[in-house]
């Protein structure tokens, strides 16, 4: 049996914030010490704001240390769907933002000297059906025409140069995507935020937020497990772990489990055979697999093996489901040992779009739908600029943020088994 442990965490020492009492006041309270919260805290602290990051667990405890480390361009929805829903102009701005997210990460890694194995590997999407492959040319053509961004379609005959698997109908490459070690990246962001004088309060759970003035200044009183704090502004960056303290947001987020295994270290020749260009790879299904080599040449293979957020039981079950999935893709790994398995929670909104805005005066950014390494970093910065400047050009703040159809959701995702079955059927028939 593999160890039930996040492999990335074996490669990093998370910084430990100095033991300090929770301050009585702050300019900005940021909830959640993941990419969103830490990137916002860093930006605000650099502008001289007094920032406190309130984190119920420890730095990077959420999805930010648990993910595949794929820093990806694009959004979850296809470009044609985006254009028909939001029109050309807004879609152009959203797509441009998705490209800018990669530069944002690159700049932060460089400026803050974050040692996180940042590598411009590009990503490869692989088609599980001929119809999916046929759609790639159409998508690449629209993206080139509308957004001036080049993707390369790889026919089945040429796919061996990209991936050592014979099961796909072709692929599509975006050269500007990146691979990194997410735990080292989130640790580096936290260290940078603290160097800039942001305070990170670990083991401090936000329990409620209410509007309250302080010496005549409007703001918010936050009740936490370690006392109260008054802040002029609040930013919520709790992603798939959004809970009862922010009930209006919780109702709009569907927490979905995602699971990852990593193998033992592979011989160099085998690693090159599986992924000759070391791409960040994912397939074209709704119920998809995503995979890549780690910097030390393990195969990291992830997917939604169970739809529910992680528990000891779903993690254990996922190990074998994912191993079988990995062998379907790569029969070469039939006898390779799986050493680690872990899970984390994704945040899906009902329209599968990222959202940013204000709810009752409280700022938020979430809904990354498994595409959050780059987007959460970018949103953190954009939200910080919005708070500091009082205005924003964030296109994701301009789209409507739908709740559940008919309001049939209180934050407990009772429909996940049905959604899981629905997506499996959809993959089968589409
Ligand atoms: C298994 C897995 C694989 C993924 N793979 C990829 C990938 O390869 N590429 C990609 O782009 N994206 C991927 N993602 C998504 C990506 O990791 C997330 O979108 C991103 O990390 C979200 O960052 P965040 O800071 O918004 O939230 P998180 O990192 O989840 O942080 C939220 C934090 O809020 C804290 N919190 C919650 N409630 C409270 C409270 N009441 N009080 C105080 N603190 C609170 C939590 O403890 C948590 O630490 C993956 C996600 C998972 C789970």
Image (cartoon, rainbow, N blue to C red):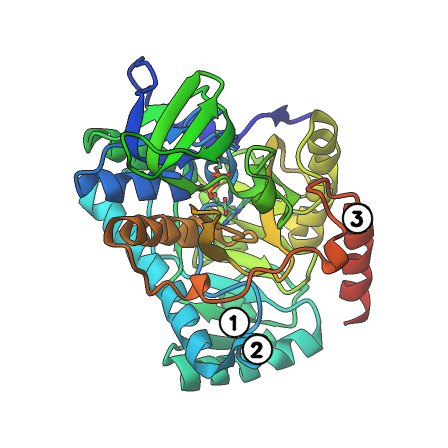
Could one spot residue 312 in this view of the protein?
yes
Q: Name the residue nearer the viewer: 255 or 373.
A: 255
**What's the distance in space between the residues labelled 3 and 1, CA to CA?**
33 Å
- Number of the front mark, 3 or 1: 3
- Number of the front mark, 3 or 2: 3
In percent of width and height, residue 183 lies at 41, 35
User: Label 3 CB, ligand 1: below 8 Å?
Assistant: no
Residue sitting farthest toward the front: 216
**What's the distance in space between the residues labelled 3 and 2, CA to CA?**
31 Å
Q: Quadrant of residue 389?
A: bottom left
Tell me the element at label 3: loop
Instruction: Look at the picture and state if 312 lies above or below 267.
Output: above
Read off the residue under disc 2.
136
Q: Name the residue nearer the viewer: 350 or 404.
A: 404
Using the image, tell me which numbered label, if any, was put on residue 415. 3
Whether residue 20 sits left or right of residue 141 in the image: it is: left
Residue at x 71% of width, y 48% of height: 325
Q: Earlier in the sequence, mark 3 or mark 2?
A: 2
- Decide: marks 2, 1 in contact (CB < 8 A)? yes
Tell me the element at label 2: helix
The local crowd at label 1, few if under 14, some if 14 to 19, many if 20 or more residues have their Cα within 10 Å, is: many
The local crowd at label 2, few if under 14, some if 14 to 19, many if 20 or more residues have their Cα within 10 Å, is: many
Could one spot residue 295 in this view of the protein?
no
Q: Earlier in the sequence, mark 3 or mark 1?
A: 1
The local crowd at label 3, few if under 14, some if 14 to 19, many if 20 or more residues have their Cα within 10 Å, is: few
In percent of width and height, residue 261 lies at 61, 38
Read off the residue under disc 1.
172
Q: Quadrant of residue 185?
A: top left
């Amino acid at each position: 049996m593999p160890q039930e442990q996040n492999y990335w965490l074996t490669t990093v020492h998370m910084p430990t914030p100095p033991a300090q009492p929770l301050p009585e006041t702050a300019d900005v309270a940021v909830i959640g010490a993941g990419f969103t919260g830490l990137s916002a805290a860093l930006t605000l602290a650099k502008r001289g704001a007094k920032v406190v990051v309130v984190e119920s667990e420890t730095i990077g405890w959420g999805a930010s240390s648990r993910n595949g480390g794929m820093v990806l361009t694009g959004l979850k929805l296809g470009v044609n769907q985006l254009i028909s829903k939001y029109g050309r102009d807004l879609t152009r701005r959203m797509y441009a933002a998705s490209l800018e997210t990669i530069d944002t990460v690159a700049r932060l890694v460089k400026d803050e000297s974050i040692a996180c194995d940042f590598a411009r590997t590009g990503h490869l999407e692989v088609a599980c059906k001929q119809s999916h492959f046929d759609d790639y040319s159409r998508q690449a053509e629209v993206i080139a025409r509308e957004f001036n961004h080049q993707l390369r379609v790889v026919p089945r005959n040429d796919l061996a140069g990209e991936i050592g698997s014979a099961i796909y109908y072709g692929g599509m490459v975006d050269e500007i995507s990146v691979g990194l070690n997410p735990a080292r990246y989130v640790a580096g962001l936290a260290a940078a935020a603290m160097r800039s004088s942001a305070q990170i309060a670990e083991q401090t759970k936000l329990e409620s937020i209410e509007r309250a003035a302080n010496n005549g200044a409007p703001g918010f009183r936050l009740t936490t497990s370690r006392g109260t704090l008054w802040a002029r502004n609040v930013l919520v960056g709790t992603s798939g772990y959004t809970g009862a303290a922010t009930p209006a947001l919780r109702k709009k987020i569907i927490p979905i489990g995602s699971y990852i295994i990593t193998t033992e270290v592979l011989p160099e020749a085998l690693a090159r055979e599986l992924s000759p260009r070391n791409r960040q790879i994912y397939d074209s299904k709704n119920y998809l697999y995503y995979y890549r080599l780690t910097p030390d040449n393990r195969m990291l293979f992830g997917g939604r093996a169970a739809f529910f957020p992680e528990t000891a039981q779903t993690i254990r079950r996922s190990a074998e489901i994912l191993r079988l999935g990995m062998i379907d893709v790569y029969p070469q790994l039939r006898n390779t040992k799986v050493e680690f398995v872990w899970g984390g929670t994704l945040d899906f909104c009902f329209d599968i779009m990222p959202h940013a805005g204000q709810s009752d005066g409280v700022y938020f950014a979430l809904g990354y739908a498994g595409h959050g390494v780059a987007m959460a970093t970018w949103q953190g910065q954009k939200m910080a600029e919005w708070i500091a400047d009082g205005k924003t050009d964030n296109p994701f703040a301009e789209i409507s943020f739908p709740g559940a159809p008919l309001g049939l959701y209180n934050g407990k995702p009772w429909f996940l088994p049905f959604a899981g079955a629905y997506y499996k059927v959809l993959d089968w028939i589409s």
